Amino acid sequence: MKRILFTLVLLCTTIVQSQEKTFEKEVQKIAKRIEIITKSQKDSLKLKVVDIDKRLKKGEISESTATTLKQELAAYHAKQIEVKVSEQEHLLQLLVQDKTNGKIASSNNTNLDNEDVSTFKVGGTTFRFKIDTDDEQETKKEIKNKIKKKRKKSQSRRTTTQVVFALGANNVLEDNQFSSLNDSNYQFWRSRFYEVGFSWKTRFTEDASKLYFKYGVSFLWNNLRLEDNQFHVKNGDFTEIQVFPEDLSESRLRHVQMNFPVHLEWDFSKNRKYKDGFVRDRRNESVKIGVGGFVGFKLGTRQFLEFRDTDGVNVEQVQFNNFNMNTINYGLSAYVGYKTTSLYVKYDMNPLFQDTEIRNISMGLRFDFD
């Protein structure tokens, strides 16, 4: 009887020891899997960050795009670690419960190999896990696809906006004759124009090209300064140029107008082509040519006169009148330049004054700032 009791005690002790060893082994497996999960996700993140840095260095993506992609990847892999580790924590809870109920399978082998790590035993059932050392959902190919999508989104921006500023010499032609500038009553270099406005530049095609439709709105200040002590006089439906009785230090006619210019622009900037065949549209990086016209209307006209009267008093006069100028104006304009700076010319097709053949012409520099 004593021998039977001794045998039973020895058997129970052996079972308890094997259960303790098995429990420790399963805990080691879970710890090992958590370590592999964390390491694989971090290694995958590092590889993708290196790939993004390479693309940034090559100029395939912008710095802001690279930062956004890195942030998205870091958040994604952190979430993957959280989800997969929580699964292992749940298995650990099951393990503790089975340990309490005495259902853990016996095993005397505490040395862990790859096969052991990928299995988990609950009672008499063995579960097998697949521990990914590489992220299946976020591969390099998908990263490239993400970059392509971001570039495509940037590329799809067919319209860009510019601020326009122009200035130069302002004068008139008579009977559409350029030679009439030699006999003009207006001072060439002191008659100036200024233009400020906004323009929109739209690509004709979805893909990168060199032809654009450019349109906008601008405000112009056209100044005409008369020579030989002359000034403008409104005489009914006609505007005459007469000699002022005093010595004029200033005789300037200024008309302000609002224009709506439209141009076809050829932008010869070299587009960037990447190894994957993607072409990025580049603008205002090289020579450009614009041809078109404008239509607008005058907002106001006034004449500035400055002189000294017979008593030696300096007099400044501002005369508000339309001086028989045509309210609606339209014409042709063109420019040729490099990057933001262009030579600019515009010519009114309708006469400046009613019942005359005098037309305004402007030549100068134009600046288009993105």
Image (tube, grey):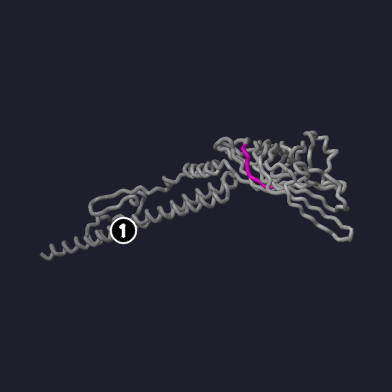
- Give above or below for 323 relative to 317: above
* Image position of 219 (left or right of 15): right
Q: Is residue 164 visible?
A: no
Looking at the picture, tell me which residue is in the foreground, 253 or 335.
Answer: 253
- Determine the main secondary structure of the stretch shown in magenta: strand
Magenta stretch holds residue 335: no
Q: Position of residue 198 (x, y in %)?
A: 64, 47
Q: Position of residue 318 (x, y in %)?
A: 77, 54
Q: Position of residue 230 (x, y in %)?
A: 85, 47
Magenta residues, start to end: 212-219
Q: Residue at x 80, y 46 (%)?
A: 233
Q: Residue at x 22, y 57 (%)?
A: 103
Magenta stretch holds residue 214: yes
Q: Which residue is mark 1?
A: 92
Looking at the picture, tell me which residue is in the foreground, 357 or 236.
Answer: 236
Extreme-bottom residue of the structure: 2
Q: Quadrant of the N terminus?
A: bottom left
Q: Position of residue 147 (x, y in %)?
A: 52, 44
Looking at the picture, tell me which residue is in the foreground, 322 or 178.
Answer: 322
* Image position of 236 (left or right of 32): right
- Give above or below for 229 relative to 14: above
- Give above or below for 161 relative to 331: below
Q: Is residue 254 visible?
A: yes
Q: Residue at x 86, y 61 (%)?
A: 313
Q: Residue at x 76, y 43 (%)?
A: 236
